């Protein structure tokens, strides 16, 4: 079965990462490759895309699947246009992170792990501290950190998402 082709933009990005490592270490480029491929596919990976990355890097498919399924920055199903992760780990929990999350779930009408019906917002599960404890409670929206949150500030941020 033939493997799908990656776009020129994605292969350029992969080549950029490959150039940073010795030629026999092509596996080191897998995270950068998957990130570029996911970005181009509206924020999630498919098996076909991971197969194409494996082919381009000359790796076994399983090596790419392992990376794609291990790291929480990769999504393996279609998600909303914007991704929100509310930290509820210890510092954020002590500073009201769970209230922030409950407010968001209520506002959006979804639970963690779900996407709004209009496809606008994905409420991503965040298992670990996001390393911004001194700004607790905090959340990450499309990889950008927002700290010292209040429910009013959350409304302002979320209402500003297209
Ligand atoms: S506990 Fe939330 S950023 Fe560390």
Image (cartoon, rainbow, N blue to C red):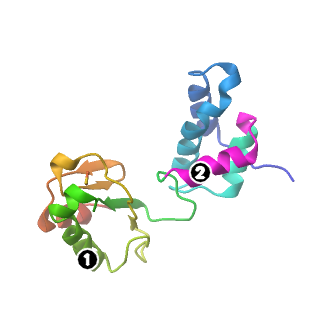
Query: Which numbered disc covers residue 86?
Result: none
Tell me the residue at 32%/55% (across/down).
141
Tell me where residue 25 sits by quadrant: top right
Tell me the residue at 27%/62% (across/down).
88
User: Dominant secondary structure of the magenta stretch?
Assistant: helix
Q: Earlier in the sequence, mark 2 or mark 1?
A: 2
Q: What stretch is highlighted in magenta?
A: 56-71
Element type where label 2 sits in the image: helix
- Category of crowding for the residue at label 2, using alpha-carbon neighbours closer than 10 angstroms: few (below 14), some (14–19), many (at least 20): many
Element type where label 1 sits in the image: helix
- Counting from the top left corner in percent of width and height, residue 138 is at 22, 55
Q: Mark 1 points at which residue?
A: 107
Q: Is residue 112 above or below residue 73?
A: below
Q: Is residue 15 above or below residue 64?
A: above
Query: Which numbered disc covers residue 68?
Result: 2
Please give left or right for residue 162 compared with residue 153 in the image.
Answer: right
- Counting from the top left corner in percent of width and height, residue 75 is at 53, 58
The answer to whether residue 5 is visible is no
Q: Is residue 129 magenta?
A: no
- Category of crowding for the residue at label 1, using alpha-carbon neighbours closer than 10 angstroms: few (below 14), some (14–19), many (at least 20): few
The answer to whether residue 76 is visible is yes
Of residues 125 and 33, the one drawn nearer to the viewer in this rendering: 125
Tell me the residue at 75%/49% (across/down).
4
Please give left or right for residue 124 compared with residue 98 in the image.
Answer: right
């Amino acid at each position: 079965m033939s493997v799908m082709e990656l776009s020129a933009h994605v292969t350029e990005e992969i080549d950029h990462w490959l150039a940073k490592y010795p030629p026999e270490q092509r596996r080191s480029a897998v995270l950068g490759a998957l990130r570029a491929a996911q970005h181009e596919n509206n924020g999630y990976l498919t098996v076909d895309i991971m197969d194409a990355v494996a082919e381009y890097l000359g790796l076994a498919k399983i090596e790419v699947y392992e990376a794609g399924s291990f790291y929480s920055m990769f999504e393996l199903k279609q998600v909303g246009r914007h991704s929100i992760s509310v930290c509820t780990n210890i510092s954020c929990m002590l500073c009201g992170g769970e209230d922030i999350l409950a407010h968001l779930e209520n506002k959006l009408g979804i639970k963690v792990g779900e996407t709004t019906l209009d496809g606008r917002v994905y409420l991503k599960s965040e298992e670990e501290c996001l390393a911004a404890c001194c700004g607790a409670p905090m959340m990450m929206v499309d990889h950008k950190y927002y700290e010292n949150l209040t429910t009013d500030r959350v409304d302002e941020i979320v209402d500003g998402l297209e």
